[in-house]
Image (spheres, helix red, strand yellow):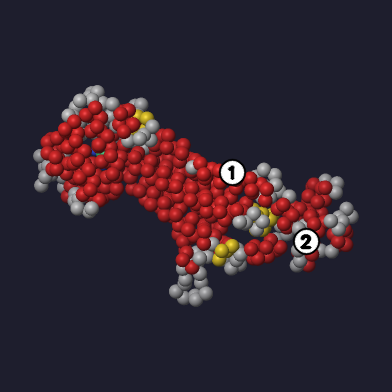
Amino acid sequence: KEKKLWGGRFDNNQSPLVEEYTQSVEFDFNFYQEDIQGSIAHAKMLAEIGILTPQELNLLIQGLEKIKAEIETGVFEWKKEFEDVHMNIEKRLIELVGDVGKKLHTGRSRNDQVALDFRLYVAKAVKEWQEYLRELITALVKVASKNKDTLLPGFTHLQPAQPISLAQHLLAYAWMFKRDFERIQDALKRIEVSPLGAAALAGSAYALNPDFVAKEIGFRASFNNSMDAVSDRDFVLESLFIASVIQAHLSRLCEEIILWSNPCFGFVLLPDEFATGSSIMPQKKNPDVAEIMRGKTGRVYGNLVSLLTVIKGLPLTYNRDLQEDKEPFLDTHKTISLSLILMKEMFLKLKFQQQNMLKAIKKGFLNATELADYLVLKGVPFREAHHISGRLVKLAENKNISLEELSLEEMKKECSKIEEDVFEALDYKQAIQKRNIKGGTGPKSVEFQLNLLKEWIKKN
Ligand code: ARG
């Protein structure tokens, strides 16, 4: 059996079960690109400060690039006995380029190496999320643009509240996802900080140049404290938190799609491609994609809590516990990416049923607030107006009709100030038209929001 790279002081081999239990290559092989990118940057820096000759640097770069090609063509052999991505690659490098390969790790520890790999990986991942968020926002804006005047019952407590436009409802999600995008933008300031040069924990006695490496890999800065650099995982926590908020937002939208596609609502028809049938009930068209997406919120939150728990109580600096930081992130990355992509695709294929939304509006006395506001304009104090409207709602409810179906005489009995023009006030479309206040559901306000979002999309 081959000696471990760290095997100098060991006489006996690790037991196979220990090897299996402690290895991480099974999942950190995912960081091979970042590991190679970081090693090339490190080698360039070593050459820059005279530790490697230009020829040695060339050999190392060629070797590392060959390894990358081997991995990408599937001929590279990952070995659990070499523990992790770092040592698998280093072993092969030494095999390929000989002794010069043994110089690569000068002034470096796996502790700063793995932190760098992970930062590179997380930075790339969250930028992908931004791209998916941008596409989803674009889809929401697109559908909203066509539905400024489409009426929808707005709910509070999941009970009919006030009429709103479908556009206003959809744009609420666009704003949520835009904030998620911005959260990533902000987190990147803290993710894109290079830890290389921190070495094991104390920094290096070689005259390394951390800023050179940071610049080489396109990061914004290098670490300020070597102990913090090798043991900090807030950048992962922050990303997992952002993912949790994204998934929460997705899950809320999923819940709406699930409700809206129920024939009792009938607001939306699910595309066949995004629905499943029942093995027993022939009529079924189930919103499984939305349900699974809602369900996956559990694992995304779980991954955040999982890493928070791993980090809790860890003394400085690196502890092997930190190896448990990767799987939660890998899992969340996969979940968030697929969820965002699928939501966009499903959403664009939803068929909104305007007639059914209109019918629903007429059922829930959504114009009762309009009636109260009408009375206020006629000089009735709001609390009283509220009461009068409530009594008229009760009357209409008993007669199983809507407010606008009451006769003027019936209304006058409750309040003599009500006149013929009340019917205009009770018009659902009017209720929306009137709300052009900043951020309101009125078409002008929606248009304003759409313009802001379109501008933002162009810039981002
Ligand atoms: N596989 C390890 C991890 O993921 C790499 C760093 C190991 N460092 C060490 N000193 N054992 O954290």
Percent position (x, y) of residue 305?
41, 45
Q: Nearer the viewer, mark 1 or mark 2?
A: 1
Q: Secondary structure at mark 2?
A: helix
* Nearer to us in this view, 227 or 435: 435
**What residue is disc 2 on?**
403
Rendering quarter of residue 231: top left
Disc assigned to residue 165: none
Q: Position of residue 287 (x, y in %)?
A: 50, 64
**In percent of the image, x 18 and y 41: which residue is there?**
63
What is the x, y in percent for residue 271?
Answer: 51, 65
The secondary element bearing badge 1 is classed as helix
Determine whether, in the image, residue 396 is placed left or right of residue 441: right
Quadrant location of ligand 1?
top left
Residue 235 position (above or below residue 388):
above
Q: Residue at x 46, y 39 (%)?
A: 185
Badge 2: few (under 14), some or many (20 or more) residues near its Cα, within 10 Å?
many
Task: Tell me the amino acid under the disc marked 1.
Answer: Leu
Inspect the image, locate mark 2, and give the three-letter code of the amino acid beneath it: Leu
Query: Can residue 295 be seen in this snapshot?
Result: no
* Circle on res. 452: 1
Q: Is residue 8 left or right of residue 140?
A: left
| Rendered residue at 57%/56% (across/down) | 143
Task: Give the number of callouts.
Answer: 2
Q: Where residue 365 sits in the image (x, y, percent)?
A: 73, 59
Looking at the image, residue 328 sits to the left or right of residue 414; the answer is: left
